[in-house]
Amino acid sequence: MISEIAIGKTMATTATMMAAKEALKIHEIVLYPDPVLAKMCEPVTVFDAALRTLVEEMFESMYAAQGIGLAAPQIGLLHRLTVIDVSYKKNAKEKLVLINPEVVETRGKQVEEEGCLSLPEIREKVARAAWVKIRAQNEHGEWFEVEGEELLARAILHEIDHLNGVLFIDRISRLKRELALRKIRKMQKNGEW
Ligand code: NI
């Protein structure tokens, strides 16, 4: 009898969770040169259920766009909030929620190709630290530290840049940026942007 009640409750909970999951909004990604992408974001101060729903929506919106990182300004919100999953759904343990993140320490240098959901089709080599240690708050407001190297270091630094209104094309040479902007203008003209 007790186990039946327990099973019934589990099923009801699962159904509620599924309904909640279905209701998650997939946000449209803001494209360059929307001015929201160039603004400084404001610290997050309220850690409530609405924030946790927004975090889930950001993960789903990022996956829907086939990205490994998404920052709040990319969905039009000037909040110091970003989500990262360099495993792209393969390992739940690699899902990172970074709220009010701060760089603690960086080491070394890596130069690798980078892209951005707000700059589709544009890829350029960008110099970043090879290793980074940051501190941030999670969706419950708890501070934690995380270290990353290679792709994770790159993703973390790229996303923190977004919170300061900086895009990866701001970190490449003027000539390469001009070429990228020319490509974007051409795509805009052709209705592909
Ligand atoms: Ni980006």
Image (cartoon, rainbow, N blue to C red):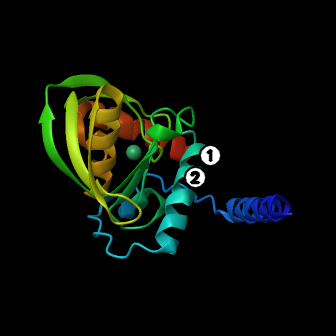
Residue carrying label 1:
64
Q: Position of residue 29 (x, y in %)?
A: 53, 54
Mark 1 to mark 2 CA distance (whole Å): 5 Å
| Residue shown at the point (42%, 60%) measured from the top left | 72
At label 1, which amino acid type do we have? Answer: Ala
**10 Å crowding of disc 1: few (<14), some (14-19), many (20+):** few
Q: Position of residue 77 (x, y in %)?
A: 42, 67
At label 2, which amino acid type do we have? Answer: Ser
| Residue shown at the point (20%, 40%) measured from the top left | 133
Rendering quadrant holding ligand 1: top left
Whether residue 84 is visible to the viewer of this picture, yes or no, is: yes
| Residue shown at the point (33%, 70%) measured from the top left | 44
The answer to whether 91 is drawn above or below residue 48 in the figure is: above
**10 Å crowding of disc 2: few (<14), some (14-19), many (20+):** many
| Residue shown at the point (18%, 48%) measured from the top left | 103
Tags 1 and 2 touching, CB below 8 Å: yes
User: Does 191 sit left or right of 117 as displayed?
Assistant: right
Residue 94, quarter of the rendered image:
top left
The answer to whether 161 is drawn above or below residue 86 in the figure is: below
Residue carrying label 2:
61
Q: Position of residue 179 (x, y in %)?
A: 34, 32
